[in-house]
């Protein structure tokens, strides 16, 4: 498909973080853009401010006539939208050009020098760091991110089209649509078992992704993963390695050993060893842009972060509020470890909203073990997203598995009162559902209370 022949783009599920980045791209290059989403959110409202018409009704009659011309309209949809969706069925039956988000990303980036970030954890942070490093060092790039970068307040960046940065999403095997020049794999923990069926099938798909690399492409892997590539790690035998790590005033300071050099006194201020590794592999990938290593190291120090990735909402001496997207046991463990490292000896109240009935069912014991590490736990109801309930899989069921007496189920409407009554030293909110929409309200209420 030649995008030059496409003049109008209609998105089904335009409010998704990845979809909205694509919508911004097409609007930026001068295409007419419109779309549907189920609910109004800050993301859809920001798209509307750009002049993108968004509908919250499935009915075909709400769509402007110009987007119903089959010859020059592209329809982009997300796998989260059911096949029975009224608009999807209309476009399908009338022979429109219909493509998944991942297919369109593949088309846009195939003629660029493409950096692709894969892994069950860390994709958004790593790709955001990489985009920041390349932008700060003057590289002409386009970036499609799965979160809002605090450095450029968007999930989309256009600084040129010679290079591209994308998240290689394993969900629905989307990353197999890409053909990167440089890729990384941060992790291959079991996830999306509703799609893959088994962890072995998931790992197999990552091997297939490696085969998507362009000829002479380079692969970076976290040291210890069962793949062949350029390795990165902390205090080990990795090709790119962090050594002499210390913390001063909440900032990591370390020496960075590369295959060609040793950079001393590098700084990185995003808490958590997992984030440190994300920064390291972003640096290693960025070296492939032929930018001098010392300039990349300087840019690494200025990275601000990504919204909902260990984001400090309140940071006072007597009260700290952190928000994170963590929705997998491994990610919850990483958040706990980061808090313990940065704020030792402080009591932590964790609020968690489970995401998907299938994920809760598949990892219930692991979730219980991870959540039990916090001093106190509040559980919200499971956020269903694209799924229908599974009999017996509830937050009450998960709560019973948590081996910590300081635990309870709570409604979102009761959060502020409960937090104020408990008076935690550290509060952390976690989850990939609509808990993120509660964060600003909590921040205002709790900042006033403290």
Image: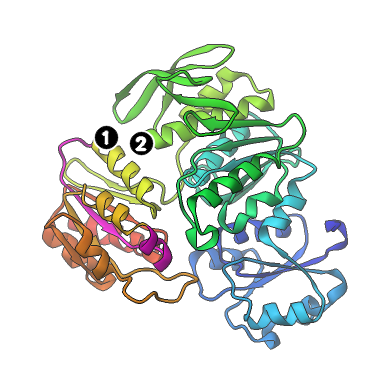
Image point (33%, 48%), residue name: 332
Label 2 CA crowd tier, 10 Å (few <14, some 14–19, many 20+): many
Q: Which residue in the structure is indicated by mark 2?
A: 271
Colouring of the image: rainbow
Left or right: residue 11 compared with residue 16: right
Residue 228 location in percent, x, y? 59, 29
**In terms of depth relative to the viewer, which is nearer, 64 or 195?**
195
Q: Secondary structure at mark 2?
A: loop
Label 1 SS? helix
Residue in the foreground of this view, choosing between 9 and 32: 9
Q: Are marks 2 and 1 in contact (CB under 8 Å)?
A: yes
In the rendered image, is residue 231 in sight? yes
Instruction: List x then y, in percent, for residue 144.
Output: 62, 49
Relative vertical location of residue 401 with respect to residue 107 in this rendering, above or below: below
Residue identified by numbered label 1: 342
Mark 1 residue crowding within 10 angstroms, few (<14) / some (14–19) / many (20+): some
Image point (48%, 43%), residue name: 122
Q: Estimate the spatial distance between the alpha carbons at disc 2 and disc 1, rounded to whole Å.
A: 7 Å
Which stretch is magenta? 342-362
x, y (%) of residue 79? 61, 66
- The reply, left or right, for residue 12 in relation to residue 361 is right
């Amino acid at each position: 498909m030649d995008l030059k022949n496409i003049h109008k783009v209609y998105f089904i599920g335009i409010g998704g973080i990845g979809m909205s980045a694509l919508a911004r791209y097409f609007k930026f290059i001068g295409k007419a853009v419109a779309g549907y989403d189920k609910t109004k959110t800050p993301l859809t409202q920001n798209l509307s401010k750009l002049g993108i018409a968004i509908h919250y009704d499935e009915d075909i009659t709400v769509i402007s006539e110009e987007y119903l011309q089959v010859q020059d309209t592209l329809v982009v949809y997300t796998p989260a939208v059911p096949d029975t969706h009224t608009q999807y069925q209309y476009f399908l039956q009338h022979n429109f050009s219909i493509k998944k988000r991942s297919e369109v990303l593949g088309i846009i980036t195939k003629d660029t020098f493409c950096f692709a970030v894969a892994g069950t954890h860390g994709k958004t942070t790593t790709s955001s760091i990489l985009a920041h490093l390349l932008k700060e060092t003057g590289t002409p790039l386009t970036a499609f991110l799965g979160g809002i970068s605090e450095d450029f307040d968007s999930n989309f960046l256009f600084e040129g089209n010679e290079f591209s940065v994308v998240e290689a999403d394993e969900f629905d095997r989307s990353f197999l649509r890409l053909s990167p020049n440089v890729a990384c794999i941060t992790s291959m923990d079991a996830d999306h078992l509703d799609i893959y069926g088994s962890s072995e099938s998931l790992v197999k798909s990552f091997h297939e992704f490696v085969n998507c690399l362009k000829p002479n492409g380079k692969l970076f892997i976290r040291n210890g993963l069962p793949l062949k590539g350029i390795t990165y790690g902390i205090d080990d035998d990795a090709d790119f390695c962090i050594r002499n790590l210390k913390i001063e005033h909440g900032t990591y300071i370390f020496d960075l050993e590369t295959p060609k050099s040793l950079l001393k006194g590098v700084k990185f201020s995003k808490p958590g060893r997992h984030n440190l590794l994300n920064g390291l592999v972003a640096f290693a990938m960025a070296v492939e842009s032929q930018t001098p290593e010392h300039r990349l190291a300087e840019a690494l120090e200025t990275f601000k972060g990504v919204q909902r990735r260990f984001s400090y909402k309140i940071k006072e001496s007597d009260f700290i509020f952190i928000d994170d997207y963590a929705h997998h046991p491994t990610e919850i463990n990483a958040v706990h470890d980061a808090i313990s490292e940065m704020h030792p000896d402080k009591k932590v109240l964790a609020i968690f909203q489970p995401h998907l009935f299938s994920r809760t069912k598949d990892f219930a014991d692991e979730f219980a073990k991870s959540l039990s590490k916090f001093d106190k736990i509040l559980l919200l109801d499971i956020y269903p997203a694209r799924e229908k309930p599974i009999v017996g899989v509830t937050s009450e069921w998960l709560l019973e598995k948590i081996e910590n007496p300081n635990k309870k189920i709570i409604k979102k409407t009761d959060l502020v009162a409960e937090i104020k009554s408990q008076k935690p030293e550290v509060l952390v909110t976690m989850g990939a559902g609509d808990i993120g929409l509660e964060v600003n309200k909590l921040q205002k209420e709790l900042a006033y209370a403290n």
